[in-house]
Image: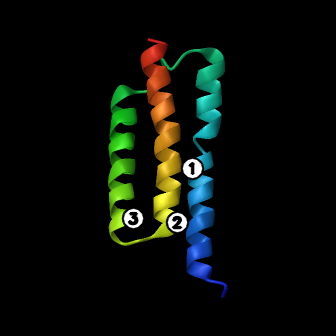
């Protein structure tokens, strides 16, 4: 398999932006509080991630698809915790 710099760059960027949600998820889980997280931010974020996922699927871009599936999962868990810890 040939090295594809653009795909590798996209995968690295996707991993970094996706794992950025992990500390927030851990903090929310441990503190059992999502009080400081804005409802509108979480809803807009999840909507944007879904749109990125649709876009990535339509252009068959693996880094965009993979990163946004995982990011949507993490953001959705944070949203569920926001609802749970009201």
Image disc number at residue 56: 3
Q: Hey, which quadrant is residue 10 in on the image?
A: bottom right
Q: Of marks 2 and 3, which one's residue comes earlier in the chain?
A: 3
Q: What residue appears at the point 34 percent right and 35 percent down from the top-left corner?
A: 43
Q: Residue furthest top?
A: 86
x, y (%) of residue 79?
44, 28
Look at 39% across and 42% down and name the residue there. 45
Residue 12 locus on image (x, y percent): 63, 64
Q: CA distance from mark 2 to mark 1?
A: 11 Å
Q: Position of residue 20 (x, y in %)?
A: 60, 45
The Cα atoms of the two marked residues, 1 and 3, are separated by: 15 Å
Q: Which residue is mark 1?
A: 18
Instruction: Determine the image quadrant of residue 53.
Output: bottom left
Quadrant housing the N terminus:
bottom right
Q: Which residue is mark 2?
A: 63
Q: Is residue 71 above or below residue 11?
A: above
Residues at circles 1 and 3 in contact by the CB criterion of under 8 Å: no
**Left or right of residue 34: residue 83:** left
Mark sitting on residue 28: none
Q: Where 1 falls versus 65 (above or below)?
A: below
Q: Secondary structure at mark 1?
A: helix
Badge 3 element: helix
Helix, strand or loop at mark 2: helix
Tag 2 and tag 3, C-beta contact below 8 Å: yes
Which callout, 1 or 3, points at the residue further toward the start of the chain?
1
Rounded to the nearest angstrom, the CA distance separating label 2 from label 3 is 8 Å
Task: Give neighbour class at mark 3: few <14, some 14-19, many 20+ (Cα, 10 Å).
Answer: some
Any part of residue 36 in sight: no
């Amino acid at each position: 398999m040939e090295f594809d710099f653009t795909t590798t760059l996209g995968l690295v960027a996707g991993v970094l932006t996706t794992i950025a949600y992990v500390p927030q998820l851990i903090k929310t889980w441990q503190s059992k509080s999502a009080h400081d997280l804005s409802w509108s931010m979480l809803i807009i974020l999840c909507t944007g991630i879904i749109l990125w996922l649709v876009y990535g699927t339509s252009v068959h871009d693996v880094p965009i698809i993979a990163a946004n599936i995982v990011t949507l999962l993490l953001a959705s868990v944070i949203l569920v915790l926001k609802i749970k810890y009201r």
